[in-house]
Image: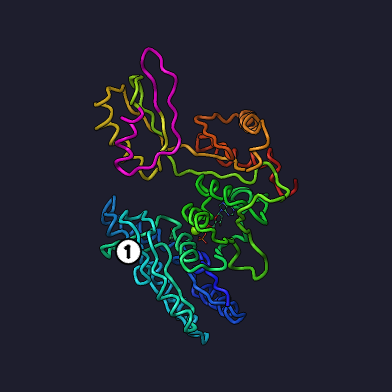
Amino acid sequence: MTLIIQKYGGTSVGSTERIKHVARRIAKFQSRGHQVVVVVSAMSGETNRLIALAREFQADPSARELDVMVSTGEQVSVALLAMALTDLGLKAKSYTGAQVRILTDSAHTKARILKIDEGGIRTDLDAGYVVVVAGFQGADAHGNITTLGRGGSDTTAVALAAALGAEECQIYTDVDGIYTTDPRIVPEARKLASITFEEMLELASLGSKVLQIRSVEFAGKYKVRLRVLSSFDEEGEGTLITFEEGNMERAIISGIAFNRDEAKITVLGVPDRPGIAYQILGPIADANIDVDMIIQNIGYDGLTDFSFTVNRSEFGRAMGILENQVQPHIGARGVVGGEKIAKVSVVGVGMRSHVGIASRMFRALAEEGINIQMISTSEIKISVVVDEKYMELAVRVLHKVFDLDQSS
Ligand code: ADP
Ligand code: ASP
Ligand code: MG
């Protein structure tokens, strides 16, 4: 008997009808002789609703309490799905993350999974149950409820697949696979039959929210067979995340990601001396704020400007630290920041064997009059920061230039 993990996202369980539809799919799947562990998200819109409700009480809600609250969204979904499955005559049991014992660290609202106690699930599976686990949540060593960051149900699913040694982890969502870019922005986007793990990791980290980055990291670390499929179509193989580049005929660029979640900060007139990057970014790191792109300009008259990007949700906090702690300490001239930026990235393992990708990208953007504010590259990606108002245009232009449109 093969064990499969199936994860259904918010839209897929967005109404009573859809939950019943998911239950019927699971029943059909189990009847073909599979053991199934199902991970579900909160009904679509619910997590946002809960966060907004919390904000009516605290502008910046206490992270511990927020976790207690937003974790209820998934708790409702698992119970409803277990009821729907029971109604179809199946044996089903729902569990919260804490009940399973998904042990996480204590970083509320962005906790990491440390360990999963899979024994109880195995016992249930062997007794013929469909096990329904709440995504996005766990508990720390003290029993505090934690959540795994937005989109974290994907990570619950892949972590369970790793812990249970599942045959495959199937992520059911509202699109039928991974596309060359978000089909909501570019209708011409093409579905990929497969994508390499490395490329998926880049796309997810650069803003493609179809899979949470940590789920892809987990899949890589534990070699989980991961597939993205539609919860609405019965047919279709979706997109498989593969570990070999193989002999797949490939475009140089596989996909384009974009991200509006960042903000740019520049520390002006910084004394250009050793240790300055550390003095600026050390306090930011100490505050557990992730930094993405970094640029230090060429010094002039002993002074330089130092720019970097952070997640928009942490922009205010980062600005506060720089203005109150860093600037007076290092004697910089000022700190300026802007939230109206977006990052657009092209990703493809084909870049390793092809030159001229960056110049093609920059020329295409220049021809549209799009100014590039920051650039960063790795072996298989090039990212640029542009004014937010040009983001969609940039994505569409690059999609065409790199022959990703359906018609090409
Ligand atoms: P779920 O609620 O099922 O977790 P998400 O909204 O998190 O669903 O992820 C699915 C969405 O991801 C799609 O509706 C699509 O708009 C978006 N998306 C972004 N980039 C891509 C991509 N490259 N391929 C497919 N979908 C993408
Ligand atoms: N419900 C959570 C969110 O909206 C987790 C998830 O959907 O994966 O972010
Ligand atoms: Mg998601």
> With respect to residue 82, does 393 lie above or below?
above
Q: Residue at x 28, y 31 (%)?
A: 323
Q: How is the image coloured?
A: rainbow
Residue 254, horizontal then vertical, whole percent: 64, 46
Residue furthest to the top in view is 301
Ligand 1 location (quadrant): bottom right
Q: Is 279 one of the magenta-colored residues?
A: yes
Residue furthest to the bottom in view is 89
Q: Is 41 one of the magenta-colored residues?
A: no
> With respect to residue 33, does 392 lie above or below?
above
Viewer-proximal residue among 69 and 59? 69
- Mark 1 residue's CB less than 8 Å from ligand 2: no
Q: Quadrant of the C terminus?
A: top right
Residue 385, horizontal then vertical, whole percent: 51, 35
Q: Is residue 402 left or right of residue 166?
A: right
Q: Residue at x 36, y 19 (%)?
A: 272
Q: Residues within 10 Å of mark 1 (few under 14, many from 20)?
A: many
> With respect to residue 317, does 27 lie above or below?
below
Residue 400, horizontal then vertical, whole percent: 68, 41
Give the residue at mark 1: 139
Q: Quadrant of the N terminus?
A: bottom right
Residue 349, horizontal then vertical, whole percent: 63, 43
Choose top left, top right, bottom left or bottom right for residue 283.
Answer: top left
Q: Residue at x 48, y 69 (%)?
A: 164
What is the magenta range?
277-306
Q: Residue at x 45, y 63 (%)?
A: 156
Q: Is residue 217 left or right of residue 68?
A: right
- Determine whether the residue tagged by mark 1 lies in a helix, strand or loop: strand
Residue furthest to the right in view is 408
Q: Is residue 188 left or right of residue 106?
A: right
Choose top left, top right, bottom left or bottom right for residue 113.
Answer: bottom left
| Disc 1 residue type (three-letter) | Ala
